[in-house]
Image: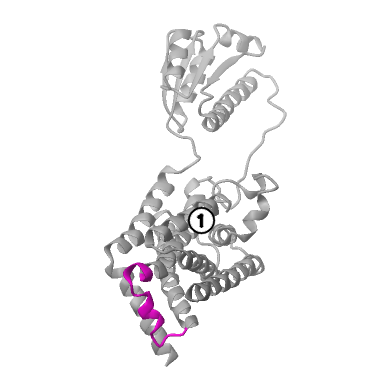
């Protein structure tokens, strides 16, 4: 009999989600928007760079340098300017992120075997992008210098560094971003759907009917937890398929281990959502509470910046964040075939967080009934 009662509540919760236009919008809209925005727009790669060049030399070496800049795939345009005033104006108006000034003795100095200077002016208002662009230009200039030295019979630079990137050889940023979305979208959907469950009952006036039904308190809580977990599992599956089939990200690890750890992750998220829902009196309060928790959880998870870069007093706060552990699991399963022992080490905190949050939500739920 208990299974019949629980099944009826689960079906009721799923129908309430699927029949409500606002709920359907929440289930479809935010995941789709985040997939498009974060996968394509939210990237730290710097491409389509606009440069301006002031070439006061017009010699063979300066023309070779300009041609190499024009041929680099990351530079969209390399525009020559006539003087320093035009160069400064392009930076001031943000028409270019960098400007290169080649002195009148550039080719002569290179032919004489003396150091030749190139001035690079960067737009400091875009500090991160400027540093990356400076690295691009430095590599091109150093490569030209090394070839000229060898062709002139001089010794090449003593050290030649060849970088090898493990797990993501071409440094494709989507290989980092899309697996992160698998975890963050599951958090978003699971948190909002669970937070709305009890609040919706109160707002619609069906909460008292639920309490006088044959369902026991723990059965009500279980029935409120399972539907968000099912919805979260569906979204997780869709994002895994999109990562592999659309973005071409390799899935090197075990899919079974990924779903096994996702079970405890979704349980911990559902516990947080139930806690918010037990506190909220209306659906609006529940949504605000979910987003109030969602933003700090994302920022403190290592999604955008490493936890090790955070202040030491802030790092212990991340210990209670379930997204922190599941991000490690998702990225590890996708990119480097994370061992079973490491997945278990990251899943154990998720199980503890799930037990703590579900216990706290059950206590608060019973307390609100008194």
- Give the structural element (helix, strand or loop) at label 1: helix
Q: Give the residue drawn at x 41%, y 22%.
A: 95
Quadrant in which residue 131 is drawn: top right
Q: Is residue 151 left or right of residue 241?
A: right
In the foreground, 22 or 151: 22
Q: Give the residue drawn at x 27%, y 63%.
A: 21
Mark 1 lies on residue: 293
- Residue 180 in view: no
- Residue 335 in view: yes
Is 132 placed above or below 317 here?
above
Q: Is residue 121 left or right of residue 315?
A: left
Indicate the position of residue 160 as horizontal and vertical percent values. 67, 33
- Looking at the rendering, the stretch of residues picked out in magenta corresponds to 201-216
Indicate the position of residue 262 as horizontal and vertical percent values. 52, 68
Please, which residue is most extreme toward the bottom here? 1
Q: Is residue 63 left or right of residue 28?
A: right
């Amino acid at each position: 009999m208990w299974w019949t009662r629980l099944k009826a509540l689960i079906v009721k919760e799923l129908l309430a989600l699927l029949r409500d236009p606002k709920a359907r919008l929440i289930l479809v809209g935010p995941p789709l928007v985040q997939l498009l925005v974060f996968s394509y727009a939210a990237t730290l790669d710097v491409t389509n760079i606009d440069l301006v060049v002031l070439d006061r030399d017009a010699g063979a070496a300066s023309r070779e340098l300009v041609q190499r800049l024009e041929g680099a795939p990351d530079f969209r345009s390399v525009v020559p300017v006539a003087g320093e005033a035009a160069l400064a104006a392009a930076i001031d108006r943000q028409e270019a992120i960098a400007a290169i000034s080649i002195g009148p003795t550039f080719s002569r100095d290179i032919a004489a075997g003396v150091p030749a200077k190139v001035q690079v002016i960067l737009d400091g208002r875009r500090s991160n992008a400027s540093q990356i662009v400076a690295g691009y230009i430095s590599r091109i200039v150093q490569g030209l210098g090394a070839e000229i030295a060898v062709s002139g019979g001089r010794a090449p630079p003593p050290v030649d560094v060849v970088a090898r990137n493990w797990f993501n050889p071409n440094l494709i940023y989507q290989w980092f971003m899309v697996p992160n979305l698998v975890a963050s979208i599951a958090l978003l959907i699971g948190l909002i759907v669970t937070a709305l469950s009890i609040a919706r009952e109160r707002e619609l006036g069906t909460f008292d009917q639920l309490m006088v039904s044959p369902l026991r308190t723990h059965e009500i809580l279980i029935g409120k937890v399972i539907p968000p977990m099912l919805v979260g599992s569906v979204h997780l599956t869709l994002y895994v398929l999109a990562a592999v089939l659309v973005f071409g990200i390799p899935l090197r690890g075990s899919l079974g281990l990924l779903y096994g750890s996702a079970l405890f992750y979704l349980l911990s998220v559902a516990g947080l959502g139930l806690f918010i829902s037990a506190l909220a009196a209306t659906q609006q309060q529940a949504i605000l509470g979910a987003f109030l928790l969602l933003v700090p959880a994302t920022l403190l998870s290592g999604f955008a910046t490493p936890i090790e870069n955070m202040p030491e007093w802030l790092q212990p706060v991340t210990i209670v964040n379930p997204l922190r552990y599941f991000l490690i699991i998702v990225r590890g399963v996708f990119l480097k075939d994370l061992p079973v022992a490491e997945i278990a080490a990251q899943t154990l905190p998720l199980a503890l967080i799930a037990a703590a949050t579900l216990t706290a939500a059950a206590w608060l739920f019973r307390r609100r009934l008194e």
